[in-house]
Image: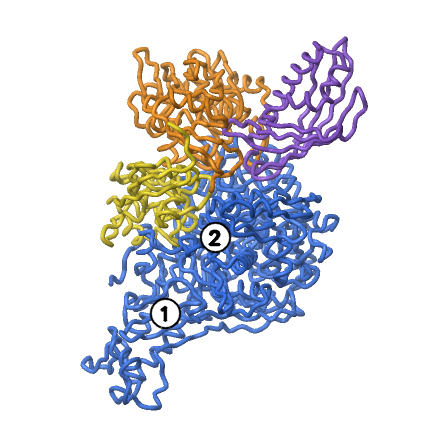
Amino acid sequence: MTETTVTPERPLVVEEGETRPGFIGQNVPRKEDKRLVQGEGVFFDDMKRHEMGFVHFVRSPYAHARIKAVDVSKALELDGVYGTLTGDEVAILTDPFFELSTPPGAHIKDYALAVGKARHVGDPVAAVVARTRELARDAAELVEVEYEPLPVLLDAEQALDDEIVLHEDAASNTVWSGVFDWGDFDAAVADADHVIKIERLHFDRFSSTPLECSGCLVEFNRGTGQWTIHGNHQMPGVGAIWMAPALRVGIDKLRFVSQDIGGGFGNKITLHPQFTACCLLARKLNRPVQWTEWRTDQHTANTHGNERTFLDVTVPVKADGTMLGFSVRAIDDCGAFPRYEPLGCIIWAQVTPGCYRWRNVRVDFTQVCTNKSPVAPNRGYSRMQHLWLTERIVDIVAGELGLDPVEVRKKNYVKHEEFPYETPNGCIYDSGDYARCLDIALDLIGYNSLEEKRRDAESRGKLFGIGIGSTLDSGTNNFGQSLILNPELQFSGNNEVATVKLDIFGEVVVTLGTVPQGQGHETTTAQVVADILGCTPDDINVRAGHDTYWNSNAGFSGTYASQFAVTGLGAVKGAADKLAGEMKQLAAAVFGCSPDDIELVESQARIKGNSEAALPFMALGAILNANNAGLPEDLDITLNVRHVYRPPFEKPDLERKFGNLTLTYATQIHACALEVDPDTGVYEIVDYAAVDDCGNRIHPQIVEGQVHGATAQALGAATHEIFTYDEEGNLLTPNFYDYHVPHALDMPPMQTGFIESESPFTPLGAKGMGEGGGAGIHAVCAALQNALGKRGEGPIVWRSCNPYHRVWEMLESPAETRKLVSVESR
Amino acid sequence: MKVSGERQFDAPVATVWSVLNDPAQMAKTMPGVESFDIQDERHWRAHVKVPLGLGGLRMSIDFEKMEEREPEFAKLHAKGNGVGAIMNMDTSFHLSGAGGGTHMKWEADVHILGPVASMGQRVLQPIVNQQVSQVLGALDKQVQEAKGT
Amino acid sequence: MEVVSRKTITMTVNGESYEREVDARRLLIHFLRDDLDLTGSHIGCDTGNCGACSVLVDGVLVKSCMLLAIQADGAKIETVEGLAQDGELTALQQAFSDHHGLQCGYCTPGMLMSATALLRSNAHPNDEEIRKAIQGNICRCTGYVNIVAAIKAAAE
Amino acid sequence: MLLREVEYARPASVQEAVRLLSENDGARALAGGQTLINVMKARAASPDVLIDLNDLDELKGIDLGSDGTVSIGAMVTYSEILDSAEARARPILAEVCAQIADVQVRNRGTIGGNVCSNDPTNHLPPLMVSLGATMTIVGQDGERSVSAEEFFLGVYMTAAGPGELLTKISVPPGKSDGFASISIGKDGTCIVNAAASVNGGARVAIGCVDAVPVLLQTESTDAAAVRDAVRNANLVPPSDVHASADYRRHLAAVVAVRAVAQAKGKH
């Protein structure tokens, strides 16, 4: 076992402080890698079963249409076709999935297949199962669907009129709406020296598009009535809560299994409709069925990130640049079905004032359905959209008032000495030092030689811009925030599970409730357990993946919302501590001493200070499991323990919409310099820095990898990645041909730095992280704004995604966007 | 997508009208028609394989005559169903006599749905133009033949 | 020479010979994964953009989703499963692990094949050459930073 | 993924290929397949029979004639052009091929496939037009030559009709060539591109603005003259999610000027 493997080559900014003993904090080799680099991972599509059938969905070509008839007879005649499933069958065999919203959203009926109407292009209308993948697609083409096209609704603001209604049962397109009002916004406006108004900002639709598309292999056991779902659902606990009642079975009838998952990024949280269709097919046809989603399916009909329009943003500002808060009307477009929504209507409130000391915030929030793909909690979920708003506010205000974007940030940031800091809506920012992170980021991109770089760019005919993106990565949800949306819901707090056992030959075996998709859970788990049990990570067997049969899962199990380092490892630590206690008890019983006299070191339990009196793990495992005669009767241990980590949360105050919504706040401060070609609008990022503070880092290399990846996704979202629809509701970026994600050549030189502000609230002082990459979108928008215009002149960057053509349009007609902003000075 | 244009025919209005309103003759102007059924005088159906160079796009197209004011105006709706594409088209033409010949003003509003619409954005417009110019060329020929008979 | 819709083909994959009857329409990637059960090569798109299915055909790096299996009749194929010999990782595979050049591991097999092809033709590539060599491989997890570092380290 | 049923043949000679193409209704030549197979995956358009040209060694060489003409077999891949000493006689060929897609696609994609698919975003159609290349087409009735200008007939349509095969592209000698594009990301799909050859005046062919490359010839190679020529061409480019017609029209002038400047720089 090597203790340290690779030191990153680039200089990292290291926080001075104690060096922690043990494996935590070290870059131990990832346990997952050996299988993955040999192509020996097991992803759902790698599995086969005897006589399995392949599922192909028949998808609506219409964005909005009544389904008048579905005729599967020709498909069934094709040799090799095993069977079909239609919306009519689904409506009989299942109940609609439960909705999280209060009315009108509560009345929406969402099924495994379209029932009665198709509501977006790609909406699955029927399913076919056949002997080969190709045949299934052939047969799907033979299913005849008679549609009556309906007017198409693609604009969220137009959706508010309810002239075209997607869900007649709800009688409105509004899923949820509510007003959040903290502090005294009117008084802040009265007290302000300047009031800046921004008419409109728009956060575009994109998704982090995991490279592995969704899918599952489902087997139905007729004897037990249980389905086994080998799939890549990244939050199967919640998936089961949706699916079991819909299928009218108990939750234990759904066994979810996954080993390796090819990225999730939140896009694999709402797979319950497709998985339910596969369960029905497996039962109906009495054979295993496999559904593999293809790229074009994923883009058109799986999930997108939330699209959000911000209207009438009003910002009161003091003469010295102190911002007092803001008000906004937000309209969130969740596409055709809410599914995980309307949680996005509250999740943003975890970061209500962004990184800033703003005390007066009023948000009028409405979420609507449109005839587009449904959404899901895409990495940075809902906070990213909101933080983009806060960052646009800071830069637009700075631009209009002639303030330095660095100084104005530092003036308004929550200060290091103010932590833990309570936001106006009761969230507790645990720790951090935003100004320091910003200084490091600026240092990394050579902020001191900025003017030189600007002159150099200008000499080459380029426009130069620099931008900052500050963001918070709030982790470990308090699901009690859902009560603010709907007090009837029975969700609050959070939990995660791990089990640890010492087996007969001395192996330490850990199972996790989390469903990893590349975050290295096996590795970091082994580090934590090794430090507690006094052995090395190599001695720890962490089972790969997830299986509800392991009984190491709870209601909120999964990998999402930046929480593994807190909830996942919290559970691991709790279980390992319990096991360590039992091992000491056992050793003490053998040696006839007190457990307090026992220490666990070098893979042994021994009497402190006496290396001769030692029991190797193998002996402990063997004694309890196979050689236990004569052990004291009152020795109540199993060497097989299960721990549920439960973060310390209260239910929020529903009246005031007030409370602690999340446990930790990691920080990401990014800085970016770019050059714009004024002839074409083409731009290139020339310097980039990302500074991360996620508290104690368990495995720095993994943390840095998360920073790189999240940043790449943000840069994609800022420059090219956008889901655009034509007026018929056809998605114009349905695959990687037109939806351009960053390639190796597209990525700018990237530097990373970090500090570690230990969280006072978590078992390891760590914070969940990985979702702060949105800072990249903010930084690029700010840098473009900086490049395109001087103070009070030039265009306003008002959309989150700015492909070249938008930049060119802004350069061509600056007045078009400039008119979005007005300043009232007193 | 809207396309429109004007065209001059060296034939009297009545001849042009007769060609434009005879489904059988019109079928000869459309590229890739494999079969053609006339259901009644207002409805007909064509099975076509639109030649796209890379391979054919098979489609069955239902035509319905929506409006006609002989001999100067007609409006037609066409709905095409193919795998990967659904097409809806409204097209109309105005005929007027012009010095012994005929002047035709035409327009068409074409809507395409399905994967072809998503994938072929930047090629649809040129392809539609291509098809239109082929149809018009063939129409010329039909008109000349009709004139000859 | 007549046209066929189905044919028995032979192929050598990672040194093993295989003979199977295939439909003309079956893509090489589906043949490898479904017919030969070599599931190391992956599918990440349906437009030939992502490179997760990259393999070497007669020593040439290609995307196996843009080649019919029947076209590879008689060919020698190398896939990710053939890189490590007797469980011993290649320098490149080891470097991917050492430098954290993979997260979810889904793009990794294709990425390794592209890097393998690069290092065979250019033993000491610079950063730009490395990026150019893996441009046809999309990774959504790593931002490519550590992948480039890993390939560079393997070359040293 | 998952193609529609298709038949397949792999002829050993050009003659046989031409016969198979003429005898089979709905037959299409399969070259590198880097476009065609993707279109087939989408099942947007499907050939009934694929005639695989990969065994036709006659279509694979690159020759440098004594007059400096570079003759490139239709089945030569982009990578082979990059590695070819003969192709270096007209350096722009390798310079442009290096920008096409990625290594895997360059290893498999062919020059003949690129021009025959004539997707408006392709690099080679405008390049061949600006270079004044000649295309050799073989059919049942023998061989004929067509200039690049006449070769491109429409989107996915060329002078190589049903039952015919493009066998060879001949590029006349020269060095003063340029190529400029605006693409989605680095070396991504072209939004607009232009190829230019300067020989006294300039021949500029602009891609992605019409169904076929638009050829402009200017006597002067000044930026202003090139811009005027583009303006006078009254382009009506298609619009898509990456560019409006206006933006494409604007970019057309920019890339035309850049391509000409690059070509001039090589004098």
Q: In this view, does A775 lie above or below A567?
A: above
Front residue of A359 and A556: A556
Specify the amino acid type for callout 1: Val
**The quadrant where residue B147 appears:** top right
Residue A362 in the image: state x and y as whole percent.
Answer: 66, 59
Q: The yellow chain is which one?
A: C
- Chain D drawn in what color? orange
Which residue lies at the image location 58% right of the left edge and 25% below the top edge?
Answer: B32
Front residue of A114 and A512: A114
Task: Identify the element where label 2 is drawn.
Answer: strand
**The quadrant where residue C132 appears:** top left
Please state the total of marks drawn on the protein image.
2
Residue A510 marker: 1
Q: The blue chain is which one?
A: A
Q: Which residue lies furthest to the left in this view?
A: A612
Q: Which chain is purple?
A: B
Front residue of A356 and C118: C118
Tell me the colour scheme of the image. Answer: by chain
Q: Kindly identify which chain the residue marked by label 2 belongs to.
A: A
Label 2, residues with CA under 10 Å away: few <14, some 14-19, many ≥20: many
Specify the amino acid type for callout 2: Gly
